[in-house]
Every structure is written in C-alpha cells, then in structure tokens.
Image: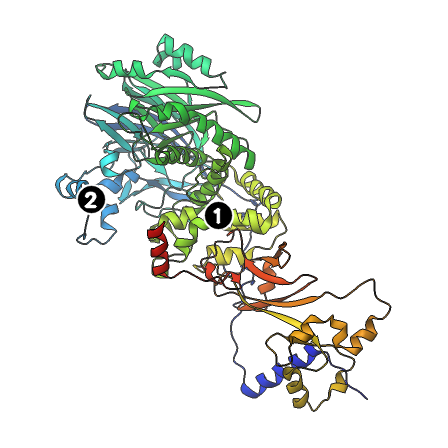
Amino acid sequence: MKINFTLSSLFLLAFTFVFAQENTTPQGHKNNNKFKQLYEEFATPNRYRTASGAPGVDYYQQQVDYKMDIILDDANTKLYGTEEITYTNNSPDALPYLWVQLDQNIRNENDMEGAKNPSSAPKFQRVERFVDNYTQEKFVGGFNIQEVKDSEGRPLKHTINKTMMRVDLPSPIPSGGQFTFSIKWWYKVNNHVTDRARSGYEYFEEDDNRAYVIAQFFPRLAVYNDVEGWQNYQFWGNGEFALNFGNYEVNITVPEDHVMEATGTLQNPKEVLSRTEYQRYKKALNTFDAPVMIVTQEEVIEKEKTKATKNKTWKFVAENVRDFGFATSRRFIWDMMSVKVGGKNVIAASLYPKEGNPLWEEYSTIVVAHTLDVYSKYTFDYPYPKAVSVHAKNQGMEYPMICWNYGRPNEDGTYSDRVKYGMISVIIHEVGHNYFPMIVNSDERQWGWMDEGLDTFMQYLTEQEFQDDYPSRRGAPSKIVRYMSGDQEFISPIMSNPENVIQLGPNAYGKPATALNILRETIMGKELFDFAFKTYAQRWMFKHPTPEDFFRTMEDASAVDLDWFWRGWFYSTDVVDIGVKSVKRYVVSPDPSAEVSEILERYNMTVEDLSPSVFMVADDSELYSEELAAKPAEDNSEILKTALEGNEGNPLPKYFYEVEFEKPGGIVMPIIAEYTYADGTKERVKYPVQLWRKNDASVTKLITSDKELIGVTIDPDEETADIDLSNNAWPKEEEATDFDQFKAKVQG
C-alpha cells in the first residue's frame, strides 16, 4: 500500500522529529500570546459594571450639591468663601466620615509639588528662568479652614492630611441618606504666570490691574465609588481631579467694574451689566453668524484707567456639573454668540484682555462654536447652556462650561502661524474637555489618559475639520514615533498613574490619541469606530467610567476583538516595527529540491511515494534557473500539463512569490503591503492582525500574479507609527550616509 503525503505534511513531520530529538523533556511556559484575552488584567464584571462595558443595574454615584458665597479681595489678592454642602449617599454602604479635597494646600509651606521631585544644579538655564528661580520669594498659600460645622451650627471634628481633609460625622450616613454641613475658609491667591499654576491671577504692571482665572478654589468632596471606595489619593500636581456631579448656587462678589464669566447660567444680568451691555447680551443670545461685542476693547481701556471703590455680586446657577470655575477682571473684553446644538441655542463666548487682540477677537469664539459642533457630532449633543474661552497667559486648563487658553500676539499685534494655530488648538482642546471628563467623568487622578488622550484624539478630528491640512501637533501616527522609539528607561505604559510618568505629554496625550486614530483609520474603520466611540460616550455621560468600561464598550459595540490592541498600546511600552524580511520567486521544477529530498531520505521514502505532486523551487535553490522561470509552469512538469488538459479557460498564474514579513517590534498590527509590478501598476493589500497569532516573529504570504513583482512596501502611508522604516521596502532602499546627507545639504 502506498502512503501519500503532501509536502506540508512532510515538513511538519520533519520539524516534529528534529524537535523531539533535541528536547527530550520539553519546558513549559506561560501563555504569552499577544492575542490572549485581557481577563487577567480586567476586574470581574458585576452588577455595578457589566462585561459589555455598560453601567450595571446596581451602578451608583454620589450626589454633592453646593451653595457658596465668595468674596474676592482684589487689593490684597485674597479669596474668602463659605459653602454649604449637601452630600447624598447613593452607595449601598454607610459612611462614617467624608473626605474633602483641599487642592490649594499644594502651595502651602510644605510645598508638596516641589518636594516630590529630586533637584540638582542645572548645567544651563535661560537667564530669566534662572533669575526667577533664585531671586523671587517663594509663594506660600493653601487653605485656611476657619470652620467646619453641621447644619445646626455644631463644630465637626476634622483632620487635615496635606491636600485631603477627613470630616468625622456624628453618625454614619446610611445608604440613601443625606448630610448637610458647611465650611468657612480663605486663602491667598497666587500669580499663575510666575508660579506656572492652573489657577490664580496675571498682574499687568502698566496699569496695576489683574486678570483672575480661579479654580480649585473651594473645598470639594472626593469621590466614593464601587471601584476603590474613597478616591483620596493626594493631589501632587500632575494627576488632576476626581469629582462628583451636583448642583451649584454660587454668589461671587468682586469690584464693581469687573466683567465675569463662570460655570453656570448668570441669574442677574440686569444687576451686573450696564444697560448697553445688557442689550448687547440679549442680542448675542440669538446671533449665530458672528460674535457680538458685549464689552469692547475701547471700553476696557477706559476702565483700566480707574478702579471702582464699590463691589457687586454675580450670581450663577449650574445643574449637574462636577466642578465650578470663574474668571473676573476689569481688563476683560467680552464677546458672545450662539450656536445651534441638537436643536437648542448654546452660548459660545470669550473673555480676553487687549493683549490678546487681534487674534482673540478674530478666532476665539468662532473656534468655541466649531468645537461644540464637531464634538457633539461624534459623541452627544452638548447639554450645557454655554462654553466660554478665557485668555490666560501660558495657560491651558478646563472646567465645566469655562476654560483658560493661551495664545498672545506680539505687542504690535502681529503673530506667527505657530502662535495662531497654538491658540486655536488649545481652545479646541480645553473646550473639548467639557465632554471628557466634565461629562464623561473619568478619574483623572488615576487615569490621566482617559480625559487627555480621548480629548486629544477628538481635538485632532476637530482640527482637521476646521481647516484642510491643519498642522496638528498630535494625533497623526508619525507624530508619536520619536517618543515610542526613545529610551525605554524614560517611557511608561499608558496605563500608568500621571504622577509616575516621566514624559506625561506624549504618554497621556499623544500616544493614546495616536492609538485611537490608528484604531479608527486602519484597524476598525471609521463607521465601526465612530459607532462604538459614540456608544461609549453616551453610555457614560454624567457617569464615572473606568478604562475597562471604555475597552469593553469599544469591542461590545463593534464586534472587533481588540484585546491584542489594548495590551500592546496601553499596557506595554512595545513598539510597532514590521518589515520585509525576504521575497522569493518560485518556479515549477521537474525535480524535487534538496529540501524535499532530505525529508524523503529521512523517512525512507521515494519520489514515487509523493506522486502525483508538483515541485516548486525558490530562486535561491540550486535547481532554479532562468530557463525554468521563462517557461509556463506546465512546460516544466508533465504531471501538471496532464492535469491542465481541457482547462485552457483557467490558466495558471505566471509568477509565484513568497513574501516573508518580519516583526522586530513587540506590537502586533495588520500588515499593509503595497506590491509594485513591472508594468507600473500597484496593488495594496491589508492582511489582518490575526496573521501573527501563531508566529510572533515572522509570517509568509504567497503572491500569485500574471505580472512580475518588482517591489514591496510596508505601510506606504505611514499609518501604523512604525518606528523603523529602513526595513519597510524590498528591494531595500539604499540609505544615504551621514557624509552624503551633509554634501546634499551643502550643495542644496
């Protein structure tokens, strides 16, 4: 009886035989396959958070409502406040104490932000930075807590631990219960320009005035949730904020000639605006084509000359927000318009000193309106009544409905494209933070990328829709290559706490934005990605998602298994590097190759045992010849010619090529290959990422064609963030030496 083997069967037997001879006792290993599911990394789904990535039937979050009276002492740069806090315990647990965030304490005499990092003698510094560092007196601030009392006016025991304060309760707040208490406090406001801080004032020496952008200005309740209980991780400066949703009633008293914007809806515009300003304000509420000037530059210049001796109180109400911020100054120009979002009017507005013009008057409010339109298209209709952009030198920071943004022209009003696009980009980014994390309320203290990375991705889409070929600084795959190919000593996985990351900008902003861009453009496709991303945004708007909720939702809403992607891009510092290892041409031969003969000899078999078979040899085989290659395949094999008789309508391809792809990088990715043929035509093929599932080092694909293959290029549009393009082409492109590059530069 004859035994019939295919060539692949023989190769498999040979491999098994050799392996058995060399390893009589095979050594085991853990499952390190790149396509292994993330069960070990993910928490077990439960009734709070489901396996699909959606909130569970028992999902809960706490409600914290504030009533505040705030007084700004402009002459002494102090802020005074009293707040009444109503805490609603929606958790299933009784709470014996509450944790309150005191973020201003990072600037007290302990200097937490400065103390956390090592210091050394700098080898060089810009002269102005050197002078600032060693001649200016260090600002000392922090909360002065004067009272903590219950609703009956009885003192509550409280303990301050750096930027956290524990308030001990007379009895635990039961599940479903409420507790109301009050805090009275004050602190000295810092100069945010010299201190490079998120909040504070900028001082204008020429007219002895200040512009205030005030945030993290009141004691705020920490989050208690199903994931970790109290999120009372100290505020060290980089990790931002974990906050509760609630309703706010805030009265802010400032000098009478100040102009103000804040989180929420202004309740008393007639009281705080002049008659002319009020008429302009009402007009802006229904103006959609261009901003209306509420306070003009000329009017501001007049106000700068004198200072009011009286005060006035601005009253704001905000519903279902996680924070509150405000900006106030007599130096603010104010413009405003409306934009239609989901069938309702939303205010887009800007505050800026004259130093921001002409750039701010021309672009700021228009960019706010554009941002609301694009972000709403990809997520959900903007639910708040307004969005405000405030000019603050060297600043970029976000709060519900209001944000601070940089971008200042030269003193003569001229500006470069770098300044212009930098300003537009930061406005898009900070206004966009209304969506992530002000509404999709992730834990910034732990997962900085969940707000910064998702927002930077959305910023990229919004920039590209603002203008063709917009010079986006982040988002495109090529922009992250330098970081990903850097020294691994200084690179952390995206899934890292912001305080423990050396290069926070690329890590929390650039890399996740690039990853999502690649996911949308290259892996999932826009339609699947956009549906899944919108599903995530709408599932978790006004709720507290975790990274797993995002990862699971993206897969749940798309039917695309992405565990390999999250593991490579988010849980590791692996890089993308895929190249062409070799290209072999195969021809049909009448004789078996040496490789086949060796297998036959090993198993005491003959060629007849393989009959009928077709033998193919590579162009590096001793049997390969140009004569064989020049003939049709059937002319080199009588068996093949016989098999093809009567099949003239379906001829064999003229060319057979085996392309071997290698993967020096750790991240598995789809292979995007462009094949170039001798007649000048090109063919682009995208092989799915699953091609790597059984061999993480290299894989081969057989290419058959009637045209001669003369070139192969991997990732021709550079859409995968491949860190090494030198191995992306066959034949390998000659690289110019450093000397040749120098000569070309000189000659050019």
Instruction: Return the x and y of residue 189 as percentages of the image width and height.
Output: 24, 32
Can residue 43 be seen here?
no
Q: Residue at x 55, y 53 (%)?
A: 45
Q: Residue at x 41, y 23 (%)?
A: 349
Q: Residue at x 52, y 68 (%)?
A: 32
Instruction: Return the x and y of residue 595 as percentages of the image width and height.
Output: 63, 82
Report whether 292 appears left or right of 147: right
Report crowding for label 1: few under 14, some 14 to 19, many 20 or more residues within 10 A (C-alpha): some
Instruction: Return the x and y of residue 646 as percentages of the image width and height.
Output: 87, 68
Q: Residue at x 41, y 18 (%)?
A: 267
In the picture of the structure, the residue carrying the numbered disc 2 is 126
Can residue 220 be seen here?
yes
Tell me the quarter of the image containing the N terminus: bottom right
In the picture of the structure, the residue carrying the numbered disc 1 is 546
Depth check: give the residue in front, 380 or 206.
Answer: 206
Labelled disc at residue 671: none
Q: Quadrant of residue 676?
A: bottom right
Q: Nearer the viewer, mark 1 or mark 2?
A: 2
Depth check: give the residue in front, 55 or 61.
Answer: 55
Rendered position, 617 above or below 258: below
Report the amino acid beneath label 1: Thr
